[in-house]
Amino acid sequence: MWVDPVGSLTTWARHHGDLFALRLPAVGRIVVVGDPSAAHDVIRSDPASSATGSATGRVLPLLGPSCVLRQDGDAHGERRRMLNPLFHGDGLARRREAIIDVTRRELAKWPADGPMPLLPRLSDLSFAVISEVVLGLTDEDQVDRLHRLVRRATGPAALAGTWLWPLGSGQLRDRTLQRVRQHQQAVDRAIVELLAKRADPGADRHDVADFLLDVAGHDAPTPARELLEELRALLLVGHETTAAALAWAIERLVREPAVLARLELPDRGSR
């Protein structure tokens, strides 16, 4: 499962069908749903028996327990209602031009000729965009530094608590977990430093950090742990999932010339 997750899941689906269960070390029982038509049933399942936040904590322990993705029940609903307006309708419309500018800036760095690995480029692009949306961050050097710290925090060692489980307690496990915590703390320190450097904290920037700081109170000497975990989670999941989805879509498009021909790239002549 750790070496070849997609291949393993595909093999098991051939043997067991579109719905089967796994029991993984340190994670426990996981139900795999491979039928797209069943997605609605999963999403609409009873929250009392489908504790999504608890499950996320088992699979992605690097997300802090205070973030919206680790919450269940009323706590999750309250946090989601608070954050949803920032990512829908007018919330993103306010950021439209800034997102376009960031995207153009990142695309200008892409090589014009020859093949290139797509996923790393899209990871840089999506992280630059989410940094703008979440932190109002536009300085390229600051974005690159924060992205490097986030990559370290989300590397293979981030799941050490699961893949080192068979070893039990010991120096190797303890040192690895300590390194994971240090990487996460480095991301938190960088976020605190960036927030402290923001000029005019009450300005009408409409980014997520400004909204959450306004809720928490600008007068606090440092952001509360809950705020840091929320911002860190948004940075992590906001760019990795987007980059993967874009890379997958482009990979499919190049195999469908008729569909690809219907797309039109703006300012193609300037490239």
Image (cartoon, grey):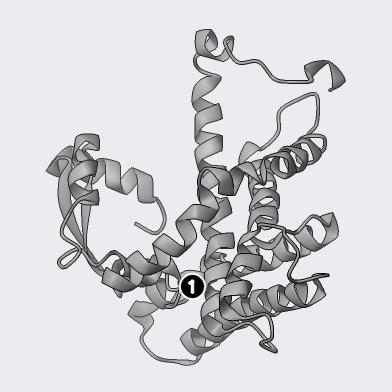
Question: Looking at the rendering, which quadrant does residue 112 occupy?
Answer: top right
| Residue name at image x 47 percent, y 76 percent | 64
Number of numbered labels in the structure image: 1
Q: Who is closer to the viewer here, 202 or 53?
A: 202
- Give residue 221's position: percent from left, percent from top: 70, 89
| Residue name at image x 50 percent, y 92 percent | 171
Q: Which residue is mark 1?
A: 62
- Give residue 212's position: percent from left, percent from top: 58, 70
Q: Is residue 172 left or right of residue 193?
A: left
Q: Is residue 180 left or right of residue 186?
A: left
Q: Quadrant of the N terminus?
A: bottom left
- Above or below — where is 156 with respect to 168? above
Q: Is residue 28 left or right of residue 46?
A: right
Q: Who is closer to the viewer here, 230 or 57?
A: 230
- Give residue 181's position: percent from left, percent from top: 56, 82
Q: Amino acid at mark 1?
A: Leu
